[in-house]
């Protein structure tokens, strides 16, 4: 939503009114409806500080209330909906029944709202689109596929399979990260205890002896001072920074784009994001092509469910290439995301008229690549984890023992 200012002439006085609209055309229409008098001009402008704070508060409250449905509950409900739809039960009655039987309160409220929208005459995809954040882009894409092909039940079966596959990958990722996470938490607790209780004892000794302190000891003492005197403020500042950052990422596309671009440059994370995206893109695109959806429409649907903006931008160029009469393999090649082997496979599928079968193999290939990255994630993180632990241990050891050795040598020198 953009902010507009309307200048209105009413009773011989000019007054400015601010309001939000999707476009300038809509802004002119809303201004005529909302304000009495002569509309002199309507221009896009920057919201006043008070309005910005109001929007920030509203967005923050909305984001805190909004939460995604639990994956296990969504998978079970989707499979149940597929079975009931396949049995000939209407979508409205099926969703109502699932809403009554589910134990997830959030999912129950969403399904009841979807059922009401369907009862009001809206399509299933339109009703689900209102809960894109909670249910995910994949669910919306597959329901749109079912409506286009006229076989919603089959699309829901495929959706539940894909959701289970994604859920399995998430569980794999969490298991791979469990050991490094637990080790780092233990080290953080140990470091906090040492900084809070051990270092202050040595600090008193060093101050009493007026010893010349080495750099590691000075760093430790500075950390101890900051932690013990400003610890709560630092935690509060970190929390506020996190909330503000989340708000900026969620509400400003340029900030979100920059953050996503940064993630694609981070060690390990870039490969996880890239192959997770390509795996999901090829999986959905293969299902759409197999169902007989035209390539351009299939690309639209598959691209719409991509979350990473730079990757989404690159893959969007494929649609433009296809619309201009180019081949799919050339469009994918221009993105620079796909290996030459994949491009050759897709080219062979296009020339032989078996693109759907070839895309299935491509989807399987990227699923294998993504699984391999997840399986090797723990081993890849270990060197980084060991380096961090080594730095912490060396800092503590040198910071405490170096001055003690210097003082010991000084005492022995005096005795001799």
Image (spheres, rainbow, N blue to C red):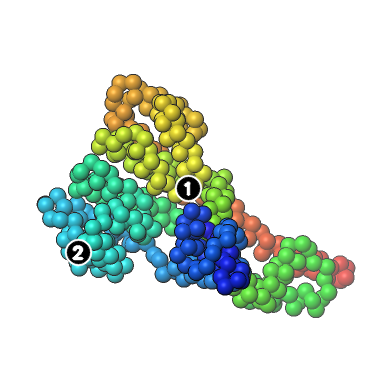
Earlier residue among tags 1 and 2: 2
Looking at the image, residue 211 sits to the left or right of residue 254; the answer is right
Residue drawn 60% across the image and 71% down it: 12
Q: Which mark is residue 96?
A: 2
Q: Is residue 223 visible?
A: yes
Image x and y of residue 243, in percent: 54, 66
Quadrant of image for the C terminus: bottom right
Q: Secondary structure at mark 2?
A: helix
Q: Is residue 30 above or below residue 172?
A: below
Q: Is residue 343 above or below residue 280?
A: above
Residue drawn 54% across the image and 50% down it: 257
Q: Secondary structure at mark 1?
A: loop
Image x and y of residue 353, in percent: 29, 23
**Residue 213's quadrant in the figure?**
bottom right
Q: Residue furthest top?
A: 351
Q: Which mark is residue 276?
A: none
Q: Is residue 252 above or below residue 320?
A: below
**Residue 112's quadrant in the figure?**
bottom left
Q: Which residue is mark 1?
A: 308
Image x and y of residue 92, in percent: 19, 59
Closer to the eye: label 1 or 2: 2
Q: Nearest the camera: 260 or 380? A: 260
Q: Nearest the camera: 143 or 12? A: 12
**Residue 215's quadrant in the figure?**
bottom right
CA neighbours of label 1 inside 10 A, class few (<14), some (14 to 19), many (20+): some
């Amino acid at each position: 939503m953009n902010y507009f200012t309307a200048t209105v002439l009413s009773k011989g006085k000019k007054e400015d009114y601010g309001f939000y609209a999707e476009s300038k055309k809509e802004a002119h229409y809303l201004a005529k409806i909302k304000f009495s008098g002569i509309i002199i001009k309507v221009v896009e402008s920057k919201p006043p500080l008070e309005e910005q704070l109001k929007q920030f508060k509203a967005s923050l409250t909305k984001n805190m209330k909004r939460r995604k449905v639990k994956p296990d509950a969504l998978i079970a409900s989707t499979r149940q909906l597929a079975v009931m739809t396949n049995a000939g039960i209407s979508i409205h009655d099926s969703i109502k029944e699932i809403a009554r039987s589910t134990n997830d309160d959030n999912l129950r409220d969403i399904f009841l709202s979807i059922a009401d929208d369907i009862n009001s005459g809206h399509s299933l995809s339109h009703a689900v689109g209102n809960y894109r954040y909670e249910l995910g882009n994949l669910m919306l894409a597959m329901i749109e596929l079912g409506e286009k092909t006229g076989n919603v039940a089959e699309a829901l079966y495929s959706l539940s399979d894909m959701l289970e596959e994604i859920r399995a990958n998430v569980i794999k990722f969490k298991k791979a990260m469990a050991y490094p996470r637990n080790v780092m938490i233990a080290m953080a607790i140990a470091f906090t205890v040492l900084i809070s209780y051990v270092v202050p004892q040595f600090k008193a000794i060093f101050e009493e002896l007026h010893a010349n302190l080495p750099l590691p000891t000075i760093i430790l003492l500075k950390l101890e001072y900051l932690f013990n005197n400003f610890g709560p403020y630092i935690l509060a500042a970190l929390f506020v920074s996190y909330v503000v950052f989340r708000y900026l990422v969620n509400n400003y596309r340029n900030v979100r784009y920059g953050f996503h671009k940064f993630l694609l440059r981070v060690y390990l994370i870039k490969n996880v994001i890239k192959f997770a995206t390509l795996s999901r893109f090829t999986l959905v695109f293969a299902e759409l092509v197999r169902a007989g959806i035209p390539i351009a429409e299939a690309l639209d649907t598959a691209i719409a469910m991509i979350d990473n903006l730079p990757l989404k931008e690159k893959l969007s160029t494929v649609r433009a290439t296809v619309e201009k009469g180019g081949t799919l393999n050339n469009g994918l090649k221009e993105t620079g995301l796909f290996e030459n082997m994949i491009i050759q496979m897709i080219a062979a599928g296009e020339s032989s008229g078996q693109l759907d079968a070839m895309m299935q193999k491509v989807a399987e290939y990227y699923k294998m690549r993504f699984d391999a990255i997840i399986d090797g994630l723990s081993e890849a993180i270990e060197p980084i984890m060991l380096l961090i632990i080594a730095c912490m241990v060396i800092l503590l050891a040198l910071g405490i023992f170096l001055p003690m050795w210097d003082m010991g040598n000084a005492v022995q020198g005096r005795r001799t």
